[in-house]
Image: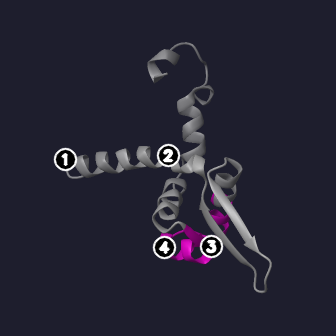
Amino acid sequence: MGMAEYKGKVKNIQDTPFGYTMSVIGGKWKMVIIYLLAENQTVRFNELKKQIGNITFKVLSSQLKELEADGLVKRKEYPQIPPKVEYSLTDKAVTLLPVLEELCEWGAKNQNN
């Protein structure tokens, strides 16, 4: 179903597949997190923070929890001291990677226009 099929049929964009998709991956950091997890397979929290750079611990934690709740990120906690937690993509998230690749290609074509 394309966006045109919903034109005039819904009162709220959130009720469309597009709205759902944007609620899952929208915002400043979620696609960046997905990209880094795709590149690195499994990443610890502090390594994600280091790779992203300008993100607070609170925001990163919140974004990871939301991605986990939406079924895109797996959180694996190891019972040791100090605690070790690793994050990776779920199979559901892997299905998003071709879409993100298309966005990157669009950016490469249009960034300097």
The span shown in magenta is 42-63
Amino acid at pointer 1: Asn
Amino acid at pointer 2: Leu
Foreground residue among 102 and 22: 102
Question: Left or right of 79: which side holds 84?
Answer: left
Q: Position of residue 25 (x, y in %)?
A: 55, 47
Earlier-in-chain disc, 4 versus 2: 4
Amino acid at pointer 4: Gln
What is the CA distance from the residue labelled 4 to the residue labelled 2? Answer: 21 Å
Q: Name the residue under label 4.
A: 51
Judging from the image, what secondary structure is the residue with disc 2 in?
Answer: loop
What is the CA distance from the residue labelled 4 to the residue labelled 1? Answer: 28 Å
Earlier-in-chain disc, 2 versus 3: 3
Magenta segment's dominant SS is helix
Kindly identify which numbered label has been placed on residue 113: 1
Front label number (4 vs 2): 2
What is the CA distance from the residue labelled 1 to the residue labelled 2? Answer: 27 Å
